[in-house]
Image: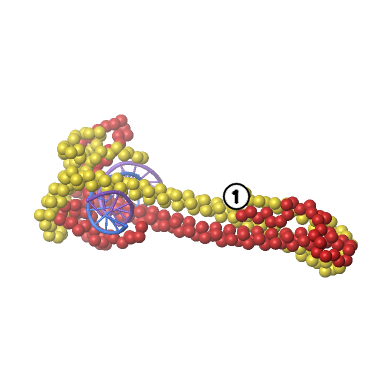
Chain colours: A red, B yellow, C blue, D purple
Amino acid sequence: MSKQLQQKITNTIQNGVSVIQNRPHNSAVNPTSTAGLQQVPQLVPVSPAGGGKATPPSKMKKNMAEKDSEEYRQRRERNNLAVKKSRMRSKQKAQDTQQRVNELKEENERLEAKIKLLSKELSVLKDLFLEHAHNLADNVQPPASAGGPGDLCNNNNGSNNNSSQ
Amino acid sequence: MSKQLQQKITNTIQNGVSVIQNRPHNSAVNPTSTAGLQQVPQLVPVSPAGGGKATPPSKMKKNMAEKDSEEYRQRRERNNLAVKKSRMRSKQKAQDTQQRVNELKEENERLEAKIKLLSKELSVLKDLFLEHAHNLADNVQPPASAGGPGDLCNNNNGSNNNSSQ
DNA sequence: TCTAATTGCGCAATCA
DNA sequence: ATGATTGCGCAATTAG
């Protein structure tokens, strides 16, 4: 989770063991990386779509031969490149997504704060409004009256803030 | 799409040659047509002496030998399992993150809508306030304004919106 | 059909 | 020593 720099040294054991440098011909196709070490043919149960055939050996040989082909190597190399690219993108995307989450979170907080503020403002204003209304109702004619809380037009709904948050 | 019926085929590299071999204890290097697997004793030419470093044959053999080791296979298998697990998690996490983004987006929209509403409410109330203020200022004692009669008392703002949460 | 992009998988190095 | 990660190459599949 916190380290991501490791791709130079690569194999320490080039004793020839896992170093399967498939590179009959020109090598040096890979400047930055220490070229390959590893693996070989992975056989996969090539699913028999067409009726469960048992992989004709004939074709296999052809495949084998193909490995030596220059063309084969080229294809492999292209693919390796593509794979690398694809993975890079994928990783980048994931990273971006994560960042988006963070941004959205922040935005959310801001919005909620704003809501809180507005709610409060609204509440205050409403109260003020009610107060005035009462005053007016109380002294429709009377000149002055102490701050008596007149309930004349108390038709308000449960009144004050209902800010439940 | 997913065929995970791959037997435990493993490639064993020997002296520059990769031999794919099945791995049931007593290795039969050539289980012809087993479950439709095309497992050919592939010999992949490992980059030989060509541009290699001195390849101490001594150690190599040791490593090679290790491949046949039962213990080695066990380690590999464990690792493969771990890798699989790790990748699964990784993928899951990415997926979750993506979903989180969606959720947050929705939440954001909701919040913004709420803000809009509150703002409007506030605006209305303020206007009302101003209006009254003007009235008061204009006529110290206006004769029952013809305008909205119950303006003040009728403060039951239909905006009883109480976002349920 | 061919190529590029994806995806699943195993290996080995490294981290923890 | 062991499980978890990660870069990498191979091969099968999927798009275009």
Q: Position of residue B61 (x, y in %)?
A: 12, 51
**Image quadrant where one finds the N terminus of chain A:** bottom left
* Residue A155 position in % (x across, y down): 79, 52
Kindly state the secondary structure of the residue where label 1 is placed. Answer: loop
Lateral position of residue A15 relative to residue A145, left or right: left
The residue beneath circle 1 is B165
**What's the amino acid at mark 1?**
Gln
Question: Is residue B49 at all visible to an observer of this figure?
Answer: no
Q: Spot the residue most to the left.
A: B58
Is residue A146 something that shows in the picture? Answer: yes
The chain containing the residue under callout 1 comes to B
Left or right position of A161 against C11: right
Kindly indicate the quadrant of the structure image that contains residue B74: top left
Q: Nearer the viewer, residue A154 or B135?
A: A154
Residue positioned 42% across, 51% down in the render? B94
* x 19%, y 45%: residue: B71
